[in-house]
Amino acid sequence: MNLLIFLERDARRDLERLNFPASNWVPALEGPDGKPLLDVLVVGGGMCGQAAAFGLLREGVRNFRIVERSERGREGPWTTYARMDTLRSPKHLTGPDLGVPALTFRAWYEARFGRAGWDALGKIARLQWAEYLAWVRKVLDLPVENRTAVIALQLAGDLVRADLRGPHGAETIFARKVVLALGRDGSGAPRWPEFASFTAESAAARSRVFHSADEIGFEAWKDKRIGVLGAGASAFDNAGAALEAGAAQVALFARRPHLPQVNKSKWTAFPGFLRGFGALDDARRWRFYAYIFSEQVPPPFESVLRCDRHAGFALHLAEPWTDLAPDASGVTVTTPRGTHRFDAAIVATGFDVNLMDRPEIAAFSKSASVWADRVSAEEARAHPEAARFPYLGEGFELRERTHRAAPGLRNVHVYNWGCTMSHGALAGDIPGIAIGANRLVDAIVRDLFVADADRHWDALLAHAEDELAQTPYYVPTERR
Ligand SMILES: Cc1cc2nc3c(=O)[nH]c(=O)nc-3n(C[C@H](O)[C@H](O)[C@H](O)COP(=O)(O)OP(=O)(O)OC[C@H]3O[C@@H](n4cnc5c(N)ncnc54)[C@H](O)[C@@H]3O)c2cc1C
């Protein structure tokens, strides 16, 4: 029996008991445009944006907007370019619930499939995770504005000016705080490898070469030959999707002589690391993550077996691509061992962290400090990926590269994968989400209060609620 309707009622009662949503306490201010000033703009309505909005409502920061460029139900990777059957993470993880038991994945799953269903569950199905996130959003009544994108942000003194585009056209607003909950590529962009014969923008490339983060029409690949570059999860998941769509041959190529075997990131998913990592000194934080990134992440065994059971699958280890040449009828891949001809190719080469790649923050990304500024040139050269991560403050805020830079920078909070070098994976993987959202919201709440301290002082002086009016001991104001 589907008990979701009862769980929903329980969850709402729990939230009510927790006084959710709390009353707004932030003073109403006017922006430079003469309109009410927004306290927080959350950009991105995926898992992290949702968690941030939940946290803000819980703390009584009610004057915020959360905008999401995609259609409702298409947020994040889950129903778009994520192609694994199940999540990598174990089923008992929590996160988007922010500690409310009735909002956990387990509660949702048990309501749908019973306790026995939960016991029998191995790993969480990807589409069920998407359904669960949508359910959390519905129960919390989060005011996500879909089909509304932030096109550009600019610093305006202490404030941030945002140009939005949504169903009703363009709009410019001012906000005191901005949360960049832009996703895995949210501090950069999909990484494209460079080849002499390949230009991503050419017509041949656009119809035959795809990044694993692209939407791909696999159904058109029945009986086709597909080449895949990469050895991580997305390489195998895309290969699996192509094989299941009926591709005759899928060849996966990796530079390494063998697949990575150990997922070092998995080790970090314990409370001590998740809560404590951000408090370490720069040298230790650098040591941990420069090492973790350099170790690379193995594909989940389920993804490997998914491919391996197809006769048309071949794994070419120690065979990197040295050239990729798309043309009108296919693509030619060159490797040190020869050439291969395919109908189409997928590059599963992940995402680059590079703030300069984000169009939304182009106006000020150069002013933001990155980890290369904090380590020796030699270290930065040895670990270029780690070196490009933004160097964030305690509340995920951008920091100035020099003291002359704009103060508004500190009101831009990077709550996406880009926070990993500074805080650990508190916005990149599900197990860290709740700790991350709480840390982010604590910082925003603190900053807003501190900035308004004098207004709060005035409010305290004006506070005149008579507590004893119902008693014989009441003394009117003029006689006190
Ligand atoms: C393929 C894949 C599989 C993963 N599997 C797991 C897993 O098994 N376990 C795990 O713990 N983690 C996993 N992760 C990591 C992580 O949990 C997800 O990336 C998760 O989606 C992160 O949530 P998010 O809110 O940061 O990003 P997203 O869910 O991607 O949300 C970001 C949102 O921002 C929106 N957006 C971007 N730019 C703008 C703009 N300018 N204006 C408005 N909206 C914008 C996007 O449309 C998107 O909906 C996976 C990641 C990927 C990519």
Image: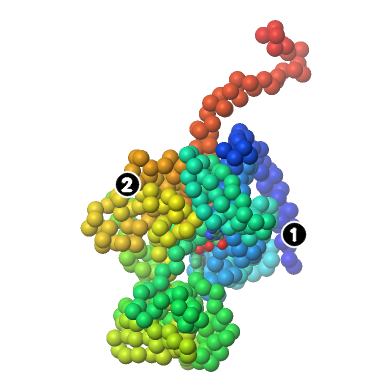
Q: Position of residue 291 (x, y in %)?
A: 31, 61
User: SS of the residue at dot 2?
Assistant: loop
What residue do we see at 52% from left, 86% from top?
A: 243
Instruction: Give the color scheme: rainbow, by chain, secondary structure or one colour.
Output: rainbow
Quadrant where the image shows the N terminus? bottom right
Q: Work out whether 218 lies above or below 369.
A: below
Question: Which numbered circle lies on residue 227?
Answer: none
Q: Is residue 8 left or right of residue 415?
A: right
The answer to whether mark 2 is within 8 Å of ligand 1 is no
Between 26 and 327, the residue placed more toward the observer is 327
Q: Is residue 371 left or right of residue 307?
A: left
- Tell me the CA gap for discs 1 and 2: 48 Å
Residue at the spot x=51%, y=73% of the render?
214
Disc 2 crowd rating (10 Å Cα; few below 14, some 14-19, many 20+) is: few
Does any portion of residue 239 appear in the rendered image? no
Amino acid under disc 1: Ile
In the foreground, 102 or 414 = 414
Query: Along the polypeptide, which appears first: circle 1 or circle 2?
Result: 1
Q: Residue furthest top?
A: 479
Disc 2 marks which amino acid?
Asp
Q: What percent of the width, then of the height, locates residue 75?
A: 59, 63
Judged from the image, the secondary structure of the residue bearing numbered disc 1 is helix
- Report the side of 174 relative to 233 (left or right): right
> How many other residues sit within 10 Å of disc 1, few (<14), some (14-19) or many (≥20)?
few
Q: Is residue 384 above or below residue 401?
A: below
Q: Which residue does the numbered mark 1 point to in the structure image?
A: 5
Q: Quadrant of residue 393?
A: top left
Is the residue marked 1 within 8 Å of ligand 1, measured from its CB? no
Q: Nearer the viewer, residue 437 or 109?
A: 437
x and y, in percent, of residue 193 in the image: 37, 74
Say which mark, if any, is on residue 281. 2
Q: Say which of 202 and 118 sits in front.
A: 202
